[in-house]
Image (tube, rainbow, N blue to C red):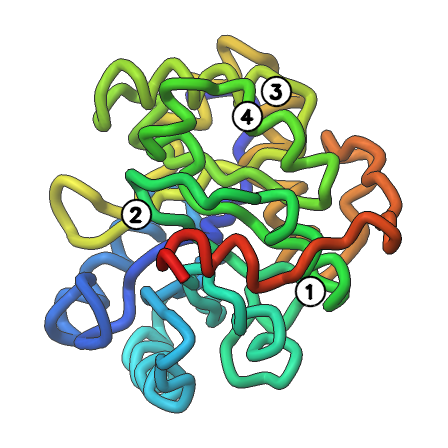
Amino acid sequence: MTDHDPELIDCHSHILASVDDGPAAIDEAIEMLRIAVDDGIRLIVATPHADAQSDYGAFKRAHTRVVEAASELRIEIMLGAEILVSPSIPTLLVQGSLPTLNGSRFPLIEFDFSIAPPSVETILFDFQMAGLRPVIAHVERYAYVQRSPAIVREWPRRGAILQVNAGSLRGEFGVAAMDVAWELATSAWPVIVASDAHNRRQRSPRLRATYELVARRCGHDRAGALFESLPGAIVRNESIVGIGDPTVEPVDRGRRTNPRRWWHRVLGR
């Protein structure tokens, strides 16, 4: 244990029953939440897998069920989604057809694990134009980031927050993911650490051991930013300036490319 007792916040978890590859039943979801409470997590965001066709209403109903079933546990359960990026996503978020993290301006998004989007800069531009600051899920696990970690340097300057899995910092997703995760954790960029929990066993909602590992290596200030203050500002929809947040470059409207062009290249259109 460290001298500082952190109020851990988990912004990426799959704890809703029967909506994705998380728990199959409500009993398992409650067991996962008990694990989180015992680990010192006081706030968790349920982020089921989503895409442009997802049923937000189903997420809301599943969230209500787990909140009611976990009413005696000392944990706050918020709703979001882990959204696979496609051209319509910024519009759907602004319309309220998909959830951001607790209704904030920060959506949790993910890319394909193997194929890099041809123009992440254009993607992030579209989110900026919609007034959104995306949190990019498990950045360290993308194969193209592992091959060329320097490609992520531009992402925070375009308004993105980088999310790292706690398991990656512990080496659970391989050496390449661990190396990138530590490079991000020790940087001055806006980074948060989350569990990306899917079950009670191999991928459970635990953060404390990783917090202590980061605190020993990077100091309590950086660990606090990764696990507490930056995740907290995100779910409260507050400014993150001063919490490892570089200056976001202004949008150059004269350089804007077709917001659908990168996606057409992926589809070969």
Tell me which residue sits at (84%, 39%) in the image.
Answer: 249
Kind of residue at disc 1: Arg
* Disc nearer the start of the sequence (4/3): 4
Q: Residue 205 carries which label?
A: 2
Along the viewing direction, whichever of 135 and 198 lies nearer the viewer = 135
Looking at the picture, how far across and down is residue 183, in whole percent? 50, 15
Decide: marks 1, 3 in contact (CB < 8 A)?
no
For marks 2 and 4, give the one nearer the viewer: 4
Kind of residue at disc 2: Pro
Along the viewing direction, whichever of 175 and 42 lies nearer the viewer = 175
Looking at the picture, how far across and down is residue 137, in whole percent? 44, 46
Image-based side of 232 in relation to 56, left or right: right
The residue under label 4 is 151
Can you say which quadrant of the picture contains the C terminus?
bottom left
Decide: marks 4, 1 in contact (CB < 8 A)?
no
Q: Which mark is residue 105?
A: 1
Instruction: Name above or below for residue 125 compared with residue 39.
Output: below
Mark pair 4, 3: CA separation: 28 Å
Instruction: Name above or below for residue 76 compared with residue 230.
Output: below
- The image quarter in which residue 100 lies: bottom right
Along the viewing direction, whichever of 74 and 266 lies nearer the viewer = 266
For marks 4 and 3, give the one nearer the viewer: 4
Mark pair 3, 2: CA separation: 21 Å
Decide: marks 4, 3 in contact (CB < 8 A)?
no
Can you say which quadrant of the picture contains the N terminus?
top left
Kind of residue at disc 4: Ile
Mark pair 2, 1: CA separation: 24 Å
* Disc nearer the start of the sequence (2/4): 4
Q: What element carries label 2?
A: loop
For marks 4 and 1, give the one nearer the viewer: 4
The residue under label 3 is 220
